[in-house]
Image: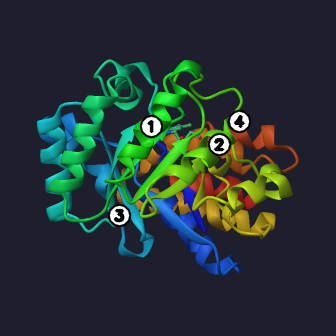
Amino acid sequence: MIWALAPMDGITDTAYRQIVKEIFDKYNTNKNRELLLFTEFVSSDGFVHNFDGIKNHLIYEEKEKPLICQIFGSNLQKLIYTAQEIDKNYDFDAIELNIGCPAPKIMRLGAGSALMIDKGNTLEIIKTLSKVVKRPFTIKTRAGVNEEDKEKQKKFIIKASEYCSIISIHARTMKQEHSGETDIDFVLDVKNKVSPNCKIIFNGWITEEKLQDKDFMVKMNKLDGLMIGQGAIWNPWIFVDYKPSWEEKKETILKHLKLNIKYKWERTWVIEFRKFIWTYTKWIDNASKYRVEFMKVDNFRDFKNIIDKI
Ligand SMILES: Cc1cc2nc3c(=O)[nH]c(=O)nc-3n(C[C@H](O)[C@H](O)[C@H](O)COP(=O)(O)O)c2cc1C
């Protein structure tokens, strides 16, 4: 069964993916569980007009594989160009189109969730992209635009499944954005009807508690995989049945920061890292005291000095 780290812009960069992968390879004992990683989404407009602005999103290491590159956009020519160039010049395991992001800045471009509105046109985009790339093609979408759209969305996913090797479904509607109940039955029903060659992955508010819930896992086992987003933010151990000690967490935090610095500027990263320290330090006593200290540092040495004190 696939356990996927959801694509998350600003979070699932190569550094974080490497951390998740390393922990998975070290601690996973379940032979039926395979980890699947995704890049942060790559703008096709950016790819065509401002490659320097998006090139960081395309950095990866061989050891992260299997790894899928996700792109977004709405202009067919730019999507074709982006998908083909990535297909030619990089060695991802598949190329994916985002059909689910509800962020206004993405929707305004007619991309992300907006692609669920004119489903006929989007199906043509899917058909075309799946044909112009040599490697497998996948999509990530939602349960529809709103409640009323769900039946139409099911039909759309069933048709799309003829061209996709994986469809990940965030089981909420566009209208729900990131909160509210997820509709597992929607995904189970789709799974029964799609092409047998297309894998179906469930996504939407999978937490550590949910993974312990037997009824929930029985449903997940009827699918090809599950995908974890926010539950995995700075909790790279969620994919394995292993609880790290604080010492191990410290090591991971420093490794994660070091990897970020390897790919990006030190000062930028130490400052960016502040926002993540909250989750990493969730389980320690006196966390708030240290968090205040973390907010003041801008280089690796000072950051490490605080970690060493905890
Ligand atoms: C910070 C953040 C960034 C995200 N970026 C992307 C993205 O680049 N591509 C994408 O398909 N979904 C993106 N998502 C949506 C997640 O992949 C996932 O579908 C959503 O968070 C629901 O899963 P969860 O409840 O497990 O978090 C993002 C979500 C978050 C919170």
- Within 10 Å of disc 2 (Cα), the crowding (few <14, some 14-19, many 20+) is many
SS at badge 4: helix
* Front in this rendered view, residue 223 or 305: 223
Residue 155's label in the rendered image is: 1
Q: Amino acid at mark 2?
A: Phe
Query: Tag 1 or tag 3, which sits nearer the N-term?
Result: 3
Q: Is mark 4 within 8 Å of ligand 1?
A: no
Which residue carries the number 4 mark? 292
Residue plotted at (53% across, 44% down): 169
Of marks 4 and 3, the one in the foreground? 3
Q: Quadrant of residue 221?
A: bottom right
Q: Is residue 96 above or below residue 121?
A: below
What residue is shown with label 2?
Answer: 294
Secondary-structure class at tag 2? helix
Q: Nearer the viewer, mark 3 or mark 1?
A: 1
Q: Does mark 2's beta carbon lie closer than 8 Å to ligand 1?
A: no
Q: Residue at x 42, y 75 (%)?
A: 63
Give the residue type at disc 1: Lys
Mark 4 and mark 3: span between their CA atoms?
33 Å
Cβ atoms at labels 1 and 2 below 8 Å apart = no
Q: Earlier in the sequence, mark 2 or mark 3?
A: 3
State the separation of the CA atoms marked 1 and 2: 50 Å
Q: Earlier in the sequence, mark 4 or mark 3?
A: 3
Residue 189, image x and y in percent?
61, 45
- The type of residue carrying mark 4 is Val
In the picture, the quarter occupied by the N terminus is bottom right
The residue where tag 3 is placed is: 60
